[in-house]
Amino acid sequence: MADSHIDLCDRDALRAYYKELVKRREKAYMYPLNTEHSLPIKFRPHPPGIGESSRPLPPFAINGGSYNLDIAYAILPFRHEKQLSQIWVADVCSSAKPTQSLGKVILKIVQPSLLPLLNLDTEFDEYLRPWEVSMSEDEAYKELKSLQGSTVPYYYGMHTAIMPNEEDADILVMEYVEGKSLEDWLSERPEHTKPEDLGDKDA
């Protein structure tokens, strides 16, 4: 996990870590993640889903191995310092056929320098450590193992990759499922302003 080696009981170490995060953040602003980047990832073979309603796994998930995740587009890029993660869609590509997509995945990226910074004037116990964010997400997805592939997307594990600012980040990789966002769903439906539109004829 990114930066998990930091000694939380050493205030001097945390102050030094704060200065390091500030430097990394400045560099992250200069070199943000974008569609020109590719992240190397090694997948472990994923077991099939439980139940007849489970979606079939793509070959790269069944077989595991080393792949490149070519960044395709952002669902939730970095926008402000209160944000705990970035969410991107990426194409899975092999080194043998680097231009051929083997399928898409969702990347939830926890990048330490882009999380809320610790406040040196308050108790350090209140600081939300980057590895706590990624670990809690990882454990939550693992708890949903029996629902993966049907009710929730398949979870392909947590990985570490180097961001464009040369910083390690934790990346949670999930199945990409085609669907519509809430905004798209609402835009396809007319606005209801009368009670009868909602089925209440007696109103």
Image (spheres, rainbow, N blue to C red):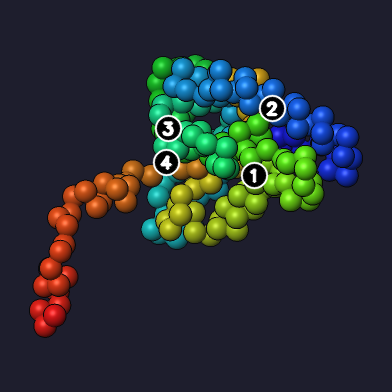
Q: Residue at x 67, y 24 (%)?
A: 24
**Where residue 110 sits: x, y (%)?**
60, 38
The residue that disc 2 covers is 22
Q: CA distance from mark 1 to mark 2?
A: 20 Å
The residue that disc 3 covers is 74
Q: CA distance from mark 2 to mark 4?
A: 33 Å
Give above or below for 194 relative to 126: below
- Give amino acid for label 4: Tyr
Q: Residues within 10 Å of mark 3 (few under 14, many from 20)?
A: some
> In the structure shown, which secondary structural element does the residue marked by tag 4 occupy?
loop
Q: Is residue 101 left or right of residue 166?
A: left
Q: Is residue 192 left or right of residue 52?
A: left
Give the quarter of the image for residue 41: top right
Q: Residues within 10 Å of mark 4 (few under 14, many from 20)?
A: some
Which dot marks residue 176?
Answer: 4
Give above or below for 129 relative to 71: below
Question: Of label 3 and label 2, which has the lower sequence position?
Answer: 2
> In the structure shown, which secondary structural element does the residue marked by tag 2 occupy?
helix
Identify which residue, 119 or 107, lies in the foreground. Answer: 119
Q: Is residue 162 visible?
A: no
**Where residue 111 sits: x, y (%)?**
62, 33
Q: CA distance from mark 1 to mark 4?
A: 19 Å
Q: Is residue 132 visible?
A: yes
The residue that disc 1 covers is 134
Give the quarter of the image for residue 54: bottom left
Q: Residue at x 40, y 29 (%)?
A: 73
